[in-house]
C-alpha cells in the first residue's frame, strides 16, 4: 500500500458494527495515524469495553447519542464519519443531528436506514427472524450472541481467534428500534458507500439503495465483511483517498 501523507491532517471517527467495539479498528487506526491523521474509535453502549452496561434499556437512539457525544465533547469539525455494518444506522442518525461537524459520510458495507426504518426491517425477514430466535434462546430476548467470525468473512485462524475473544453480545432492542430522522438519509452531505466482495447477505438492500443514488459514490473492494480486520491496508487506502478529497 502506498500510504498517503497529507499536509492537512483529517479527523476520522470510525464506528463499529454489531457485536464489535472500537477495538476492531486497531489496524486501520494505526495506518491512518501513521499518515498524520486524528482517529477516534468510540465503542457503543453495551459492547466491547462497555459490555458491562449491556441491558434491556439500550436503544438505537443510545447508539446515535454515543456517536454524537464524541463529536460534541471532543469538539470535532470536518469529520470523516465512517460506519461499518450496523454502524451505518448510528452514523445516519448522528449526521442528522450534527451535520455541521461532518465533512463526509462513509458507509462501510453498512446498513442504510430511511426515516422510520429499523435495522430488522432492512436485513431480510429470514435473517431477522433467526436473530430474534437466537436472542430469545440466549437471553430471553435481551441480546444476540455473536456469530462465528466466518460470518464476517474472517477465516484466518489468528484473526478468527482474535474476534472470538473480543466480540460480545449485542442488544437486540437496537435492531428493533426505528430510526427517526429530520432530514433525508445522508443529510445532504457527501457520501461514499464501500461494499466488500463477496457480498454480505444482510446488506443487500442497503447496497442496492446506495447504488441507486447518483449523488453518492459507490465503491467495491475485495475483502471480508470485517474489512478492517481482513484487509486493513486496502481499507485504509480507500479512506485516505476519501480524506484527500473530502
Image (cartoon, rainbow, N blue to C red):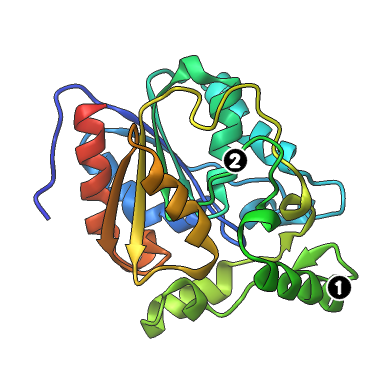
Judging depth in this view, the residue of 47 and 237 nearest the camera is: 237
Q: Would you place residue 127 above or below residue 113 in this image?
A: below
Would residue 97 appear left or right of 216 to someone viewing this image? right
What residue lies at 86% left-to-right and 46% top-to-bottom?
57
Point out which mark residue 174 bears. Answer: none
What residue lies at 39% left-to-right and 44% top-to-bottom?
212
Would residue 245 appear left or right of 63 to someone viewing this image? left
Residue furthest out toward the left: 2
The local secondary structure at tag 2 comes to: helix
Q: On the rendered image, what quadrant is the N terminus found in?
A: bottom left
Report the number of discs.
2
Q: Quadrant of residue 136?
A: bottom right
Q: Which residue is mark 2?
A: 90
- Residue 87 in percent (x, y) is at 55, 48
Q: Quadrant of residue 12?
A: top left
What residue lies at 37% left-to-right and 69% top-to-bottom?
224
Residue furthest out toward the right: 140
- Residue 75 appears in view: no
- Residue 73 in percent (x, y) is at 58, 21
Q: Are marks 2 and 1 in contact (CB under 8 Å)?
A: no
The local secondary structure at tag 1 comes to: helix
Judging depth in this view, the residue of 1 and 106 nearest the camera is: 106
Point out which mark residue 136 bears. Answer: 1
What residue lies at 46% left-to-right and 58% top-to-bottom?
24
> What is the distance, in whole Å, between disc 2 and disc 1 at their CAs?
24 Å
Q: Would you place residue 151 above or below residue 220 in this image?
A: below
Nearest to N terminus: mark 2 or mark 1:
2
Q: On the rendered image, what quadrant is the C terminus found in?
A: top left
Amino acid at each position: 500500500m502506498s500510504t498517503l501523507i497529507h499536509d492537512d491532517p483529517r479527523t476520522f471517527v470510525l464506528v463499529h458494527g454489531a457485536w464489535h467495539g472500537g477495538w476492531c479498528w486497531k489496524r486501520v487506526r494505526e495506518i491512518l495515524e501513521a499518515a498524520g491523521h486524528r482517529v477516534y474509535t468510540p465503542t457503543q453502549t453495551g459492547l466491547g469495553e462497555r459490555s458491562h452496561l449491556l441491558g434491556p434499556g439500550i436503544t438505537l437512539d443510545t447508539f446515535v447519542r454515543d456517536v454524537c457525544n464524541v463529536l460534541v465533547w471532543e469538539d470535532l469539525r470536518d469529520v470523516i464519519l465512517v460506519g461499518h455494518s450496523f454502524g451505518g444506522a448510528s452514523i445516519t442518525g448522528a449526521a442528522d443531528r450534527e451535520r455541521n461537524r461532518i465533512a463526509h459520510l462513509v458507509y462501510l458495507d453498512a446498513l442504510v436506514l430511511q426515516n422510520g426504518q429499523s435495522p430488522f426491517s432492512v436485513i431480510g425477514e429470514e435473517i431477522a427472524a433467526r436473530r430474534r430466535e437466537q436472542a430469545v434462546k440466549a437471553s430471553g430476548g435481551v441480546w444476540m450472541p455473536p456469530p462465528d467470525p466466518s460470518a464476517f468473512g474472517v477465516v484466518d485462524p489468528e484473526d478468527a481467534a482474535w474476534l472470538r475473544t473480543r466480540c460480545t453480545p449485542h442488544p437486540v432492542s437496537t435492531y428493533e428500534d426505528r430510526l427517526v430522522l429530520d432530514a433525508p438519509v445522508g443529510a445532504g452531505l457527501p457520501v461514499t458507500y464501500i461494499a466488500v466482495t463477496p457480498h454480505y447477505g444482510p446488506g443487500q438492500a442497503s447496497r442496492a439503495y446506495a447504488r441507486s443514488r447518483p449523488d453518492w459514490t459507490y465503491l467495491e473492494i475485495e475483502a471480508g465483511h470485517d474489512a478492517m480486520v481482513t484487509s486493513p491496508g486496502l481499507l485504509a487506502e480507500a479512506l485516505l483517498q476519501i480524506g484527500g478529497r473530502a
